[in-house]
Image (tube, rainbow, N blue to C red):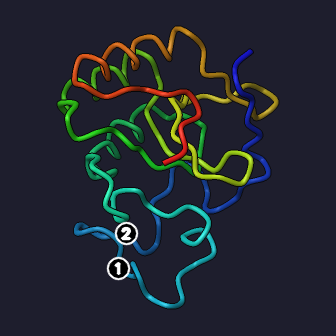
């Protein structure tokens, strides 16, 4: 059975909003002593040095999609061409992302829509295309992978 996540318990910032500390070059308070609680709970894998595309590369399409999942960071490996990732985001209404699951940072194929109970299900229709794209570019997609 797919993982169920209750996003009602995680309120870092409102869904579909930009962070107050976001700017063109990244985060204006990154590595400062007093950043907001959300930044301590959900550190950005890009800023932590992971080999992924800058998360804001996908901001426009995620806003355009009006998905109702919040509090995630897109985490698409740099080896995957941006245009291929954008096409798959549109086709599957999902994105490879980092979320907090059971108190740990976890990489998932995240559906952009929650159900009426505030849960999401990464179905085979979402997982299979992402796994295929990842494999094509030498990336192994592991369900519930901890970065």
Q: Position of residue 50 (x, y in %)?
A: 33, 54
Q: Residues within 10 Å of mark 1 (few under 14, many from 20)?
A: few
Q: Which mark is residue 22?
A: 2
Instruction: Give the secondary structure at mark 1.
Output: loop
Res 85 quadrant in image: top left
Res 18 quadrant in image: bottom left
Q: Residue at x 58, y 72 (%)?
A: 40
Q: Which mark is residue 131?
A: none
Residue under pointer 1? 28
Instruction: Give the secondary structure at mark 2.
Output: strand
Q: Position of residue 124 (x, y in %)?
A: 56, 9
Q: Contact, CB < 8 Å: mark 2 with mark 1?
A: yes
Q: Residues within 10 Å of mark 2 (few under 14, many from 20)?
A: few
Q: Residue at x 39, y 43 (%)?
A: 75
Q: Is residue 29 left or right of residue 120?
A: left
Q: Position of residue 92 (x, y in %)?
A: 44, 17
């Amino acid at each position: 059975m797919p993982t169920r996540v209750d996003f009602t318990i995680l309120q870092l910032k409102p869904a579909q909003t930009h962070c107050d500390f976001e700017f063109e070059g990244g985060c204006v308070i990154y590595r400062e002593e007093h950043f907001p609680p959300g930044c301590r709970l959900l550190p950005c894998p890009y800023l932590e040095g992971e080999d992924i595309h800058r998360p804001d590369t996908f901001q426009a399409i995620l806003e355009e999609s009006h998905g109702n999942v919040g509090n995630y960071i897109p985490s698409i490996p740099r080896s995957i061409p941006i245009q291929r990732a954008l096409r798959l985001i549109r086709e599957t209404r999902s994105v490879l992302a980092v979320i907090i699951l059971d108190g740990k940072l976890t990489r998932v194929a995240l559906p952009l829509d929650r159900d009426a109970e505030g849960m999401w299900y990464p179905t085979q229709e979402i997982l299979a295309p992402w796994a295929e794209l990842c494999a094509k570019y030498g990336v192994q997609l592991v369900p519930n992978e901890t970065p």
